[in-house]
Image (cartoon, coloured by chain):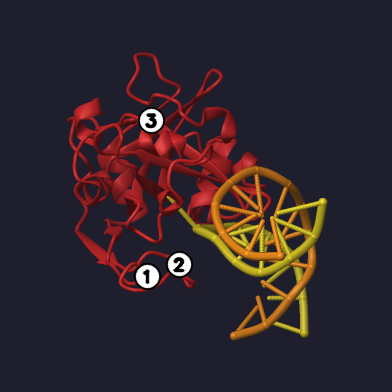
Chain colours: A red, B yellow, C orange
DNA sequence: AGCACGATTAACT
DNA sequence: GTTAATCGTGCTC
């Protein structure tokens, strides 16, 4: 996706990412998956967003130009992938929470310790482990030519259209005050069965 | 300098 | 349903 796609209202970007493909070039291997869950985090006023602390070393990337990866470390062991949105100077990003793997099943199974496929990438830290994404990619420009991490449309340059996209409160914000705790900025896509999705996506 | 907690996960009972 | 793992970050003293 070009940078203009991310230089829009974060809520719209989060919703529109559902059905698009997240791609990781890991050495000579290509790993990808359809984005099925994402959350919007928007501005210093959003008390669920890290930018509530203002401009710090950690939040610096979120204040930068759209289309870069904001990757942070939490719980002493997990990496999380976000994509920076909106104009430079305004801190906002979309957290990628779940994908459905369509390329690189073998290496994903390996990286996810041979767990069953439905547990491979159904969480923000899980998909980072599956796609070999960590802090070394923080600030990475996912809109650059020859990027090793990027978002693309599917074969007809459109998202795999979800049967529906539902919005709910964001996950894991139990200590965040209202209205931010309940604001419906989490988007989850419902798709056809895995087999149908894979047939539609092609290889 | 010290501390509480986290946009989570996996392994328990 | 409950809890340990494990450490960077931001806040308080």
Please provide percent x and percent y for residue A137: 52, 29
Q: Quadrant of the N terminus of chain A?
A: top left
The lab-note entry on whether marks 3 and 1 share a chain reads: yes
Residue A160 image point, x, y percent: 23, 44
The structure residue drawn at horizontal position 48% and vertical position 66%, both measured from the top left corner, is A172
Q: Are marks 3 and 1 in contact (CB under 8 Å)?
A: no
- Please say if the residues under marks 1 and 2 sit with CB atoms less than 8 Å apart: yes
Q: Point out the tag, 3 or 2, that comes first from the N-terminus.
A: 3
**Classed neighbour count for the residue bearing mark 3: other residues with Cα under 10 Å, few (<14), some (14–19), many (≥20):** many
Q: Which residue is mark 2?
A: A173
**Residue A78 in view:** yes
Q: Secondary structure at mark 3?
A: loop
Q: Does the rendering let one see residue A132?
A: no
- Quarter-wise, where is residue A52 in the image? bottom left
Q: Which residue lies at the image location 54% right of the left edge and 56% below the top edge?
A: A119
Q: Which residue is mark 3?
A: A68
Does the residue at mark 3 contact the one at mark 2 (Cβ under 8 Å)?
no
As helix, strand or loop, the secondary structure at mark 2 comes to: loop
Residue holding disc 1 = A181
Secondary structure of the residue carrying numbered label 1: loop
């Amino acid at each position: 996706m070009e940078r203009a796609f991310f230089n829009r209202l974060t809520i719209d970007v989060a919703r529109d990412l559902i059905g698009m493909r997240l791609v990781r070039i890991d050495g000579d291997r290509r790993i990808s998956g359809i984005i099925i869950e994402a959350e919007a985090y928007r501005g210093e006023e959003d008390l669920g967003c890290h930018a509530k602390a203002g401009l710090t070393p950690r939040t610096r990337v979120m204040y930068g130009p759209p289309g870069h990866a904001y990757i942070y470390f939490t719980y002493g062991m997990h990496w999380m992938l976000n994509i920076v949105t909106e104009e430079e100077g305004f801190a906002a990003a979309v957290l990628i929470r779940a994908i459905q793997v369509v390329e690189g099943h073998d290496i994903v199974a390996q990286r996810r310790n041979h767990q069953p496929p439905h547990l491979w990438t159904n969480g923000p830290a899980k998909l980072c482990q599956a796609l070999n994404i960590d802090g070394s990619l923080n600030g990475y420009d996912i809109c650059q030519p020859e990027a090793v991490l990027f978002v693309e449309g599917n074969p007809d340059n459109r998202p795999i259209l979800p049967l529906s996209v539902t919005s709910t409160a964001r996950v894991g914000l139990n200590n965040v005050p209202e209205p931010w705790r309940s604001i419906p900025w989490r988007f989850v896509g419902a798709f056809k069965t895995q087999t149908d999705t894979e047939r539609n996506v092609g290889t």
